[in-house]
Image (cartoon, helix red, strand yellow):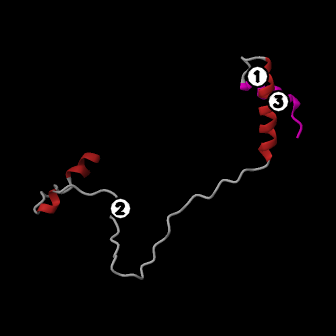
Amino acid sequence: MFINNINKMPPKKAPTDDTATAPKKRGRPKKVIDTETPDVKTKAPKTKAPVKASGKGGDWKGHLKKTFDAGKKKDPKYKYSQAMKDAKLTYKK
C-alpha cells in the first residue's frame, strides 16, 4: 500500500537560482530597530526582585550553629550532620 503512494509523488525539481543553493537560516529573524526616530519606546532590562529573608529559618539556623559550635569544642571530629540531629532534639518552636 505505502509503496504505491510513494511512487505516485512527483520527483523533486532541481534548484534553478542562486538563493536555492544557499543554506537556510534557522531561528527567528532579527528585528531591525530604526534609530532615527526618537519616539520609539524601549523597555528597560528586567531585573530580579531582591530575595526577602523569612524570619522562620533564622531561629533554627542560630540554634543549629550554637549546637554545632558547642559540639565542635568537645570533639574536633564532630560533624554538621550530627549537630542537626542533636539540635532537632533540643529545638523548641
Check contact, mark 3 vs mark 1: CB within 8 A: no
Please state which of the two labelled residues, at mark 2 or mark 3, is closer to the viewer. Answer: 3
Q: Is residue 14 magenta?
A: no
Residue at 72% over, 22% down = 79
- List the residue tagged with mark 2: 28
Prevailing secondary structure of the magenta residues: helix
Quarter of the image where one finds residue 74: top right
Q: Classify 10 Å Cα crowding around label 1: few (below 14), some (14-19), many (20 and above).
A: some
- The answer to whether 87 is drawn above or below residue 14 in the figure is above
Location of residue 3 in the rendering, given as x and y in whole percent from the top left corner:
25, 46
What are the residue bounds of the magenta stretch?
Answer: 80-93
The disc at residue 72 is 1
- List the residue tagged with mark 3: 87
The tag earlier along the polypeptide, 3 or 1, is 1
Q: Label 2: state its secondary structure.
A: loop
Q: Classify 10 Å Cα crowding around label 3: few (below 14), some (14-19), many (20 and above).
A: some
The Cα–Cα distance between marks 2 and 3, rounded to whole angstroms, is 55 Å
Location of residue 9 in the rendering, given as x and y in whole percent from the top left corner:
21, 55
Location of residue 38 in the rendering, given as x and y in whole percent from the top left corner:
39, 81
Label 1 amino acid?
Answer: Lys
Label 2 amino acid?
Answer: Arg
